[in-house]
Amino acid sequence: MLGHAWQSWARFFSQEWVSEGEGGVEATATEPAPTPSRRRVWLVALAGLLLAALAGWGLLVLNSEAVRRSHPAVAVLLDSPVKTLSQPWVVESPSAQFPLNVPARVIALPDEWSINHPGYQGSVWYRFRFDPSASAAPDELQALYVERACSNVEVFLNGQLLYRGGRMKLPYARNCFRSHTIPLPAALLNASGNLVDIRVVGYPIDEVTARQRAGGLAAVRVGPLPHIRQLEAEQEFWSSTLSQVLGGILAVLGVFALGMAWVRRLDYLVYFGLLTIGWALMTGRFWLGDLPMPNATSEMLMALLFAPMAAFAVKFLLSYAGARIQNVISEAWMRRINAALWAQCVLLPMSLLLAGTHRLFAGSRIWYLLFAVEVFFSVVFFLWLAGKKRRPEFWLMCGALGIVTTVMGIELAYQYGLIRLWGIHVTHFVMPLLYASVAVRLIQVYAKALRTAEGARAQLERRVTEISDEIERNFSQIAELRAEQVAEKERKRIASDLHDDLGAKLLTIVHTADNDRISTLAREALEEMRLSVRGLTGRAMVLSDALADWRAEVVSRLRQAGIECEWRNPNDIIEEPLSSRTYVQTTRILREAVSNVIKHSEASHVIISAEVHLDLHDFVLVIQDNGKGIPMELDGRLDRGHGMTSMKHRAKQLNGQCLVESGPGFGTVIRLTLPLEIATMQQALTGGGLPSPGTASMINQNRAF
């Protein structure tokens, strides 16, 4: 049932989001998402609050269990050789030895100075009496374990100084976050009645900015050295080492976030990077135990970090929610919020300076409460906007809200003295883990955006390549078309000049010449010139019209020569196109063939047949005479003095062939086979490239026919 409900909620919030600009604003690729109903919005908000409460309750239980297990009253099992010293005699005295002339009182550990020694600054002596464990081996080294002493500690055994944690004069060494293990020499141990004196120096709670750094003493245990070392290692790992490691990880994540912000120019990554780096700097309190500066200065510096960190947290949540881009918060209000956030960075140190060194804790508690309220309402605002827009981060931030609220609640309750925390604090490493989870989500969003950008870039590169190739092809075609147009224009100019100048003069010669031979030659030259002009103009024609022209000319010439001509045309009207070039070259081949018949064949009858093979995309002209034939050369070839070479060359230029069959006394047969224009164009189209501009124009002409 729970799994089915979770899948339903997951499907409801499965819409993809893409980050834009400064905030994570969604970008719908196809169509906008439907607006959820008011009832569903309230159900989602209720589920988010329940998840936040569950996360907060889990953290509270975990922290309580950690504190309970590390508490002195339950730390030692019945069969353990380690003893807990929990009720010492306590004396407030600055003396160098435990004072014997001052009344002492018995206090149960842990001893918190803000409760048992309010306003006291200096040294407090703790005296313990113990007997060595009877179960311990005679040669086994004993040790004393001080779980926590703030700020520093000295240990005496039977009046002899054994251990000093650091500087015992102002400013004291800061060892509030570390434990102490002191081996007890066997030569100084008595069989019974051993006295352990512990001197603790520290600051009153009014002179620190956090209760954790006020004076106090936690559990004290004595037992075999290996067991004590094990206790120290466990305590050191959970209270200090883990926080240090997480602080280093946060520093790396912060630098990485700043790098991503530099690349993508996103404000919310800048704020998150500064926030994580600031938290990593705050973990420096686990490393820096002996600062060469007054206590008030170091406390002021630690408190100053909270103001910019609260500002970074608020700005990160507002920017990541996309409040400014989505016009949820106006520009004027954003300026007011920014001014208030950065103003508190100046007001915090000023207020603490005005309050004085004896009121640091009172002033810092007010600021901590204000920062907690700011962060809390920023998270609530983000959840409201994320739930409204169905952001994938909604559930993550719901859990974060519960954890942040619980951590701030525990911390504020401890600072205000409502609860007492001794031992392992889960809150020390929960916040770094929370930052790390948010950083992982940001890296995931960045990686997804990077993959999307890479895919878009690759697609853009492919598109640019395709467009570039297309532009190159178009440019080449345009260049060829331009050259063809220029050539066509030049051909028309030459044709016009020939027709107007040379044609006119030849026509004059034809009509004015007194000699018949000159008139005939002029007429032939005029016809040849007209044929050349027609070839230059480039006007195509239909094959049926070309056959009619050829028939009229051939029959007329042969009849003038006294030769009978029989022309056989196909029965159908052939609408296939014929270019001007093919028409001109074919006309010249026919003229050469007819001239050979008239001049050399001595024939009396000629049969010319035209055949069109649409399936083979060609047409055939066969010229057959009954003359004497063509004599053979010595090498067995036909006499090439009758224009045969010219005819074959012209046919070859048209991708055709001209075959001559002849023999003495058997007449001559000339077979001219030429491809139709449609076949030539198909060959160009299937040859692996685009047709030339001339061919393209021919295609258009063919379509016109």
Image (cartoon, rainbow, N blue to C red):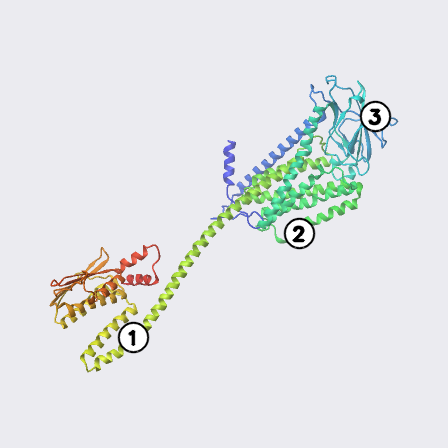
Q: Please tell me whether mark 3 sits on a helix, a strand or a loop.
A: loop
Q: Which residue was labeled with disc 3? A: 159
Residue 5 seen from this side = yes
Q: Which residue was labeled with disc 2? A: 336
Which x, y percent locates residue 9?
A: 52, 38
Spatial CA span between label 1 and label 2: 89 Å
- Amino acid under label 3? Gly
Spatial CA span between label 2 and label 3: 64 Å
Q: Earlier in the sequence, mark 1 or mark 3?
A: 3
Spatial CA span between label 1 and label 3: 135 Å
Q: Is residue 705 left or right of residue 159?
A: left
Q: Residue 61 sits in which quadrant?
A: top right
Q: Is residue 210 left or right of residue 405?
A: right
Which x, y percent locates residue 430?
A: 64, 36
Residue 564 vs 685, above or below: the answer is below
Residue 324 vs 135, above or below: the answer is below
Q: Please tell me whether mark 2 sits on a helix, a strand or a loop.
A: helix
- Amino acid under label 2? Arg
Which x, y percent locates residue 231?
A: 69, 26
Give me the residue at 50% from left, 41% from top.
Answer: 14
From the viewer's perspective, is the residue at label 1 or at label 3 nearer? 1
Q: Please tell me whether mark 1 sits on a helix, a strand or a loop.
A: helix
Disc 1 and disc 2 in contact, CB within 8 angstroms: no
Q: Which residue was labeled with disc 1? A: 498
Q: Earlier in the sequence, mark 2 or mark 3?
A: 3
Q: Can you name the residue that lies furthest to the right here?
A: 101
Circle 1 Cα neighbour tier, 10 Å, few/some/many (<14 / 14–19 / ≥20):
some
In front of the other: 322 or 262: 262
Q: Is residue 158 left or right of residue 13?
A: right
Circle 2 Cα neighbour tier, 10 Å, few/some/many (<14 / 14–19 / ≥20):
few
